[in-house]
């Protein structure tokens, strides 16, 4: 079974959060390598929090 990884962006303003699928990868290492590049991008708004994470597509946190 092949696992597809993606970078997921979660941006929150107050109690409202939105998620955006940023990029997909075939290997976890590729996802983690690109994660550092995305984290370095300055925010484009007045978000309270911005979080980028690498995770398998369709997975849920615990």
Image: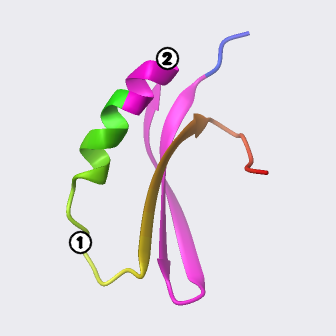
Q: How busy is the neighbourhood of tag 1: few (under 14 within 10 Å), some, or many (20 plus)?
A: few
Residue 5 image position (x, y, % from top left): 55, 29
Residue 8 image position (x, y, % from top left): 50, 49
Q: Which residues are magenta?
A: 4-32
Give the SS element for disc 2: loop
Q: Residue at x 58, y 83 (%)?
A: 16
Q: Residue at x 49, y 77 (%)?
A: 12
Front-most of residues 23 and 60:
60
Q: Which residue is mark 1?
A: 44
Calculate the distance from the C-alpha at mark 2 to the C-alpha at mark 1: 28 Å
Q: Earlier in the sequence, mark 2 or mark 1?
A: 2
Q: Residue at x 66, y 12 (%)?
A: 2
Does 27 appear in magenta?
Answer: yes
Residue 21 image position (x, y, % from top left): 49, 48
Q: Which mark is residue 30?
A: none
Q: Which mark is residue 27?
A: 2
Give the SS element for disc 1: loop
Q: In the displayed image of the protein, which residue is found farthest to the right?
A: 62
Magenta segment's dominant SS is strand
| 22 sits to left or right of 3 | left
**Image height of 60 relative to 34, above or below:** below
Does 9 appear in magenta?
Answer: yes
Residue 18 image position (x, y, % from top left): 54, 70
């Amino acid at each position: 079974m092949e696992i597809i990884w993606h970078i997921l962006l979660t941006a929150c303003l107050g109690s409202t959060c939105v998620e955006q699928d940023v990029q997909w990868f075939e290997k976890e290492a590729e996802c983690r390598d690109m994660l550092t590049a995305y984290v370095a991008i300055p925010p484009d708004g007045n978000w309270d929090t911005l979080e980028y994470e690498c995770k398998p597509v369709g997975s849920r946190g615990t």
